[in-house]
Image: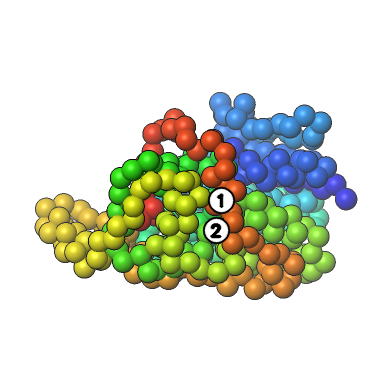
Amino acid sequence: SPMNISITGATGFIGSYLLRTLAGAGHSVRALARPGREEAVERPQGTDVEVFTGDLTDPESLRGFLRDADYLLHLASAHDHFTEEEMQKVNVAGTEILIEEAQNTAAKDFQFIVVSSAVIGMPVYSYYRDSKRVQEKIIRGSGLKWASFRPTLVYGVGDMRHTAPLLRKCGARKGTYWVKHEGLSKLNPVHVDDLVDVIMRFFDYDRAKEVDCIYEIAGPTGIPFNEFVDLTIAATGGGVKRRNIRRKWIERAIFIKGLFMDVTRERRGAGYFSLHHEHDIRAAVVELGWQPRPFAEGIAEVAAGDWWRETSGTGEAARLGTGGV
């Protein structure tokens, strides 16, 4: 039956997919937009989408955002290109504001659903990840019904920040894709449609509001980074050649560079690819009947169109495998 669902982060890559799917399924969707960003929220024709102007750092602006809401899908965050102070205000204090608003105005059986890739895997790498872990702990201790979806690397059509630059780099007619490690560490990417599918399945789960749920969301199996790159090159029809530089040489270069400047970011990037990033998706598979597609299938679908061949407005280059994620 139709539900009242509030969502933050609806103008982002994942959030826009969720909004379209929720609205298309007949639910009433209230999407938070920062002042001046209202037009960025999609409002598919014939659907019930309300744009609510507010800011996660301004409690007064959020009054009424969760009124009579059955669910909140919380995706908005300040990423690691923001200052630590900004991440604290948005990711931690902003979540506390939402919890207070839910306790005061949401529907009786309200559930807080957080979607964040920052809390999956090893607890390392950045203040951003730390702030998102604190965020989840605050939600878990709020007394509200809650659920957490922890997707790994999400890819799909329309992702101009990560997927498009990667496809352009792998789809070049010639050149070299330098991988600054041996390429043996495993990744477990998940298609954005599969992430949306598992969240939609959760709404039909008969025990969704009886127990607190945590779902790690990833592909069916981990693949070595070299295979990840090779499959992407094949999907794009690119002519680039993958070449690996042994990790020890990169670490020595970072050490020397560190004698003269801060190399924290480089060290974190090198450390990331010293670990396997495989995740346990059994809870979603067993409880929700979910089955993600393999990366080879998914990346071929995503690369089939020409959308990714256009440079993004920021001109941001692909960083995967070149020093950090």
Q: Which mark is residue 300?
A: 1
Q: Is residue 202 visible?
A: yes
Q: Tell me: residue 106, above or below residue 63.
A: below
Residue under the image location 58 percent in, 72 percent down: 280
Residue under the image location 71 percent in, 31 percent down: 43
Q: Is residue 61 visible?
A: no
For the C terminus, the image quarter is bottom left
**Nearer-the-camera pick, 123 or 266:** 266
Q: Tell me: residue 191, above or below residue 52.
A: below
**Nearer-the-camera pick, 124 or 109:** 124
Is residue 258 found left or right of 206 in the rendered image?
left
Q: Which mark is residue 296?
A: 2
Question: Where does the image place residue 224, in percent across and percent down from the top left?
Answer: 43, 67
Is residue 25 found left or right of 198 in the rendered image?
right
Q: Which mark is residue 84?
A: none
Give the quarter of the image for residue 256: bottom left
Which class describes the residues within 10 Å of circle 2: few (<14), some (14-19), or many (20+)?
Answer: some
The amino acid sitting under disc 2 is Ala
Give the quarter of the image for residue 281: bottom right
Q: Tell me: residue 14, above or below residue 39.
A: below
SS for dot 1? helix
**Nearer-the-camera pick, 97 or 271:** 271
Is residue 207 found left or right of 96 in the rendered image?
right
Question: Where does the image place residue 278, in percent across and percent down from the top left?
Answer: 50, 70
Q: Tell me: residue 316, above or below residue 1.
A: above
